[in-house]
Amino acid sequence: MTSMFKRAVCLLALSATLPLASLAHAADWPTDNVRLVVPYAPGGTTDILSRKVADLLQKEIGTVVVENRAGAGSTMATGQLARGGRGSDHTILMASPGHTIGPVIYKNLPYDPVKDFTFIRNVIEIPNVMVVPADSPYHSVKEFIDAAKNKEMTFSSSGVGSSIHMSGELFKTMTGTKMTHVPFRGSGEALPALLSGDVDVSFENMPTVLPHIKSGKLRALAVTSAEPSPYLPGVEPLSKIGADMGLGDFVTTAWFGLIGDDSLPDDAVKTLQTALDKVLDDQSFKDFVAQIGGETASEEGDAFRDYVAKDVERWQRVASQAELK
């Protein structure tokens, strides 16, 4: 065998092993526990969803630890993720509209909501629901608006910059009503105030209030999506109910998806996307989504990034209308 022939055989053997080596490298991630950060306090929609995803995800990739880091409308935890640091290649975050609203209302944040992150996959989308306590004197949107034009009302939210907060601000602006925002550290803290009647109304995420609507502890006046929700038969969208009250263009929904910092390795992204496909196809997850009144989302990678960029533009328009800073 000539030396030239030997070199050719060696090169062929090496090239044949490269795809296998690449697959082996991809299979190496994760090499540590994965941390799934929830940028809100326990008890709200983001927290409940994250724990369900983590339970199913760890069947595919190993241990997933859920970590709550509430503060500043999700911008605190999001800023920490953007800065990276120790273990950032094993840290992901469940983003929601707070990710796109925060940069609109908080000035000089140290990150860009689109450019500084890796977009793994959108998970679900849900409408918000305009709800009042069961003993509220208001049984319709019109009754509430008429009353709120003559006296000061309060509306609760899971925090400044949440879709719940922004929905309330948009409602206030479009109807010319008197409403004071009462923020809490997550829906888990906001819900008791609503149930007890300490606040007049909320535009809460459906998963948080759906059980209490069904039990009769809360009264649903409208949904904030463009179309009625199959999970709340008989409850119409605000844009339809309030078309002659200035609410014809009122549409807000919440999305929830996984992101990492912009240095998250490609093999980690691929592993997570493959695992998430299995999670979303799991019957127990489909049942869970139905229970909370949501719909499975489909965007991943660049499509998810584009979706988030458009959401930033939408909330910029809302903040401008509501004159929020």
Image (spheres, rainbow, N blue to C red):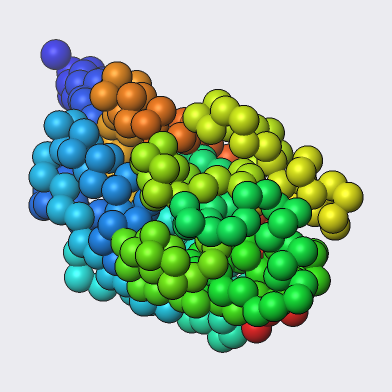
Using residue 246 as the reference point, say whether residue 241 is left or right of it. Answer: left
Query: Can see residue 185?
Result: yes
Quadrant location of residue 21?
A: top left
Above or below for 234 versus 226: above
Closer-to-camera residue (56/114)? 56
Say whether residue 160 is left or right of residue 148.
left
Front residue of this view, candidates 32 and 54 = 54
Q: Of 64 and 161, which appears nearest the observer?
A: 161
Specify the quadrant that holds the C terminus: bottom right
Q: How many marks?
A: 0
For the view shown, which residue lies furthest in the top direction? 1
The residue depicted at 62 percent of the width and 65 percent of the height is 168
Q: Where does the image place residue 229, in percent across and percent down from the top left?
A: 58, 32
| Residue 215 point in image, percent of width and height | 37, 40
Quarter of the image with the N terminus is top left
Q: Against 248, is 172 above or below? A: below
Q: Position of residue 205 (x, y in %)?
A: 48, 51
Position of 126 with respect to 311 (left or right) is left
Where is residue 180 shown, x and y percent of the image? 60, 79
Residue drawn at x 51%, y 47% as measured from the top left = 219
> Seen from this angle, which residue lies furthest right?
244
- Residue appearing at x 22%, y 37% in the figure: 57
Judging depth in this view, the residue of 265 and 179 nearest the camera is 179
Res 274 visible:
no
Q: Residue at x 50, y 77 (%)?
A: 182
Residue 266 vertical placement versus 76 (above, below): above
